[in-house]
Amino acid sequence: MDVLTPSLEDYLEAIWILGLKRRVVRVRDIIKFLNVKSSSVVGALKALSDRDLVVHERYGYVELTQKGVAVAKEIYERHKMLSKFLHEILGVDPKVAAEDACRMEHHISKETLERLTKFIEFIETCPEGEPLWLSSFHYFAKHGVRPEHCGVRAKTTNGDEAVAFSKLDELEVGRRGKIVRITARGDIKRRLLDMGLVPATEVRVEKVAPLGDPIDVTVKGYHLSLRKEEASAITVEVIE
């Protein structure tokens, strides 16, 4: 009796949402909100009442029990999180995102939902704003082509060789590369960015110390000396 069908979950969520907007919820409000027939609402309310999730007397108002509030809030929060992920992270149209979230919310596991929640939290609390890779994805989704700083990682359909990538500390003396991404964090990343080592910038390895540390490079005509730890955090597209 405690197992709820997707349909019953939709009714619980509808009652919760309607209750946030108005003081009392009537059967006709639910009919309009879900675009269903009166007989369907009556049957659903009876099933929810049997599970001690709602209180509804014939021709009276519909109220959630304490148990019903807890379940409805959980369903509603799942819906909001999924809709937020689809719209704000993936860039799906808000109306489509809401509709798809409604379908997904009934079947997603607790583990996956928690991971999605952490994923959104990670992006929203990033001190540097929207991550470069996410901005690059939005550009790709909108235009169908990769941003300039994104290389192609696999072979093309006509058999051409794939673009070669390397860590800057592994690039041989005299070779050039275009910076693709920087994996360092905190002070190290800020130092590298302040030195002009930003995505899409060309860098040339000039000299490497006998033990591999430091590494001298040229960026925009300037000579820089990098620690091996710093150079290893820079991925480049090998140019020559």
Image (cartoon, rainbow, N blue to C red):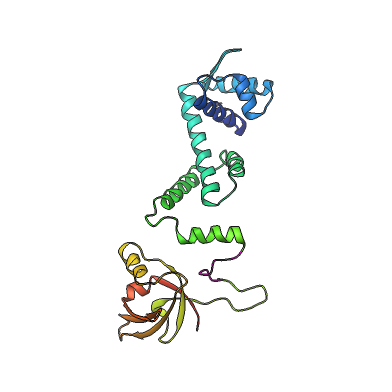
Q: Position of residue 236 (x, y in %)?
A: 46, 74
Question: Where does the image place residue 212, in percent across and percent down from the top left?
Answer: 32, 82
Extreme residue in the front direction? 221
Mark yes or no: residue 77 visible. Answer: yes
Which residue is at a point 62% across and 44% down the rendered structure image?
A: 96
Vertical arrangement, residue 164 with respect to residue 29, above or below: below
Is the residue 140 above or below the residue 104 in the image? below
Bounds of the magenta segment = 145-152
Is residue 3 one of those drawn in magenta?
A: no
Tell me, yes or no, if residue 109 can be seen here: no
Left of 32 or right of it: where is 63?
left
Q: Nearer the viewer, residue 40 or 190?
A: 190
Residue at 65 percent of width and 77 percent of height? 159
Residue in front for this viewpoint, 2 or 238: 238
Q: Residue at x 40, y 86 (%)?
A: 173
Q: What residue is at 68 percent from the left and 20 percent from the top?
A: 39
Main SS class of the magenta portion in the image: loop
The quadrant the N terminus occupies is: top right
- Percent across and percent down for residue 138 are 54, 57
Between 41 and 27, the one nearer to me in the picture: 27
Vertical placement of residue 176 versus 84, above or below:
below
Left or right position of 227 against 150: left
